[in-house]
Image: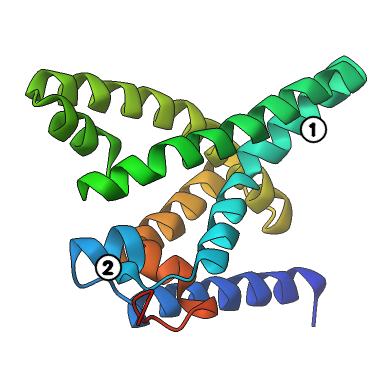
């Protein structure tokens, strides 16, 4: 069997498995989608958060800045990592306390303002677009190398797979392989 055929087979089966897990653990409610029904063990939740941080955008950008600036670029790596952890530690308890799943919902609830919600939505979209642009470029590079396709086709393949997986599974699908879903404290 040719090497390229094996690569297509391996990549195809891997993503079929991931999509199968997403379908099997499909989120049935908002709580299932955003917080996996409250049944994610803190260690598994930490692993899922760390996996999100260790993404294409993080690795490509951090490797690039350290390569460009030398060890002085390492301060950006520390700031990026520390900022991510600090944001999670400072924001998550308030989201949970107010019973909200998203930052715009929290802002609207906390400040009793739909205008504040709109501003938060605009900020989240801007920040997300900036992050996702780097992420999709990384996905395109990976697929273009492994599948020997154009980088734009690689981006489309990656976006399709991520879209299906995220829409179906949410947090429940992401943590399903490592967690038995039972609410914490029971």
- Residue 15's spot in the image, x, y percent? 53, 71
Residue at the (58%, 39%) spot, across then down: 85
Q: Is residue 113 left or right of residue 40?
A: left
Q: Which corner quadrant of the image does residue 8 belong to?
A: bottom right
From this view, report whether residue 48 is shown above or below residue 40.
Answer: above
Dot 1 crowding, Cα within 10 Å, few <14, some 14–19, many 20+: some
Q: Secondary structure at mark 1?
A: helix
Q: Which corner quadrant of the image does residue 69 belong to?
A: top right
Instruction: Please state, as top left, top right, bottom left or bottom right, where the N terminus lies in the image.
Output: bottom right
Dot 2 crowding, Cα within 10 Å, few <14, some 14–19, many 20+: some
**Which labelled disc corresponds to residue 63?**
1
Q: Earlier in the sequence, mark 1 or mark 2?
A: 2
> Residue tagged by mark 2?
32
Asked whether the viewer can see residue 101, the reply is no
- Residue 94's spot in the image, x, y percent? 32, 41
**Which labelled disc corresponds to residue 183?**
none
Q: Secondary structure at mark 2?
A: helix
From this view, report whether residue 157 is shown above or below residue 38.
Answer: above
Q: Nearer the viewer, residue 128 or 134?
A: 128
Q: Is residue 132 left or right of residue 55?
A: left
- Residue 31's spot in the image, x, y percent? 23, 63
Q: Nearer the viewer, residue 42 or 79?
A: 42
Residue at the (68%, 25%) spot, across then down: 79
Q: Which corner quadrant of the image does residue 117 belong to?
A: top left
Residue at the (22%, 29%) spot, across then down: 107
Q: Is residue 33 left or right of residue 115?
A: right
Instruction: Please state, as top left, top right, bottom left or bottom right, where the C terminus lies in the image.
Output: bottom left
Q: Is residue 50 left or right of residue 39?
A: right
Q: Residue furthest front?
A: 185
């Amino acid at each position: 069997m040719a090497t390229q055929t094996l690569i297509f087979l391996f990549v195809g089966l891997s993503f079929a498995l991931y999509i199968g897990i997403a379908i099997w653990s499909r989120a049935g409610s908002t709580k299932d989608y955003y917080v996996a029904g409250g049944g994610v063990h803190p260690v598994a939740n930490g692993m899922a958060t760390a996996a999100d941080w260790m993404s294409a955008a993080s690795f490509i950008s951090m490797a690039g800045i350290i390569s460009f600036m030398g060890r002085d670029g390492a301060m950006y790596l520390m700031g990026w990592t520390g900022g991510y952890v600090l944001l999670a530690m400072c924001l998550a308890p308030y989201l949970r306390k107010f019973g909200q799943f998203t930052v715009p919902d929290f802002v609207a609830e906390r400040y009793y303002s739909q205008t504040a919600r709109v501003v938060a939505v605009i900020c989240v979209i801007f920040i997300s677009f900036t992050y996702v642009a780097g992420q999709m470029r990384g996905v395109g590079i990976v697929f273009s190398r492994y599948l020997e396709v154009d980088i734009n086709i690689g981006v489309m393949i990656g976006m399709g797979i991520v879209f299906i997986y995220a829409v179906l599974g949410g947090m429940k699908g992401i943590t399903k392989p490592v967690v038995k879903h039972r609410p914490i404290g029971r």
